[in-house]
Amino acid sequence: MSDTLKIASWNINSVRFRMEIVERFLREETPDILCLQETKTVDDTFPAAAFHKLGYTHQILHGQPMHHGVAIVSKIPIREDDRLDWQANGEARHVGVRLDNGLRLENVYVPAGGDVPDRTLNPKFGQKLDFLERMIGWSEKLSVPTLLVGDFNIAPLESDVWSHKQLLDVVSHTPVEVDTLGRLQAAHDWIDLGRQFVPAPERLYTWWSYRAKDWAASDRGRRLDHMWASKDVAEQAVAHRVHEPCRSWLKPSDHIPIVTEFRF
């Protein structure tokens, strides 16, 4: 492995349906590792051969039929570390690997939480908060260099959404979600790499709804996708980028890829 490591994360919203833009991104950006969320396929129908052709011969998959699913594909050796059931119902929402340099890489797809921010009226919202509580317990016990990436489905800062006031009662930016995510961050002193390189209140979105006729013109974005690092790992980060043009590619995901480059 070279002294530079480039890791990408992308909620692809069906890897088989969007393989064409995944291939384009990999050719243009050439990350060493790509973490995918919402692959929406069982492992047997994951497009493994297409990734192999591009040099991503190391693949750790955790899929399920039609929904959820996570995967890590890599040009460098990775070995499976864990598949944690933070949802407590068997959904494929996490996979963790270790690299030869000792880095632990965790790929997570946090539940969206439904539409109503009330666990009594909307059990999905309660499941999301409980998912995060389990992640908090896990984070408190971490003792190795770790990078946590994925779709957290929460935009924590006021500047992480297009309108703080209008989204205060909208799932993904409610005070209880922001508070819970804050406790998760504090549980391991996680460093938010996105905001390390693009400090608030600078605009930094990773998701735009399909509902907008022209997503770029309305620009009602949210920063739902994150990379958090242990302090020792964050110190090795040299660059972080969001790839906004991908949102305009053919058959796009509603999320865009985020990439951090490290020098070990």
Image: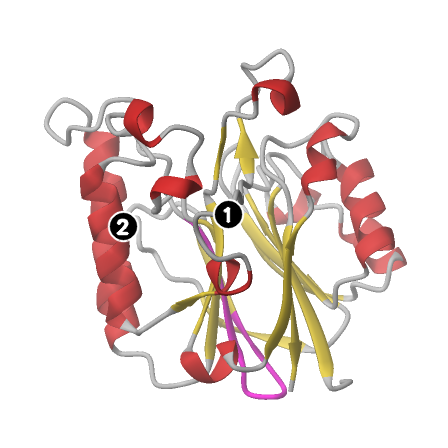
Please identify the dominant SS of the magenta region. Answer: strand
Residue at 74% across / 37% down in the picture? Answer: 245
View extreme (front): residue: 201
| Label drawn at residue 87 | none
Q: In which quarter of the image is residue 142?
A: bottom left
Q: Nearer the viewer, residue 241 or 112?
A: 241
Residue at 30% across / 74% down in the picture? Answer: 188
| Label drawn at residue 202 | 1
Q: Would residue 134 be visible to someone looking at this image?
A: no
Q: Which comes sooner in the sequence, label 2 or label 1? A: 2
User: Dot 1: within a 10 Å radius of its alpha carbon, few (fewer than 14), some, or many (20 or more) residues?
Assistant: few
User: Dot 2: within a 10 Å radius of its alpha carbon, few (fewer than 14), some, or many (20 or more) residues?
Assistant: some
Q: Nearer the viewer, residue 179 or 44?
A: 179
Label 1 residue SS = loop
| Label drawn at residue 131 | 2
Label 2 residue SS = helix
Q: Compared to 251, does 150 lie above or below?
A: below
Q: Give the range drawn in magenta.
A: 97-109
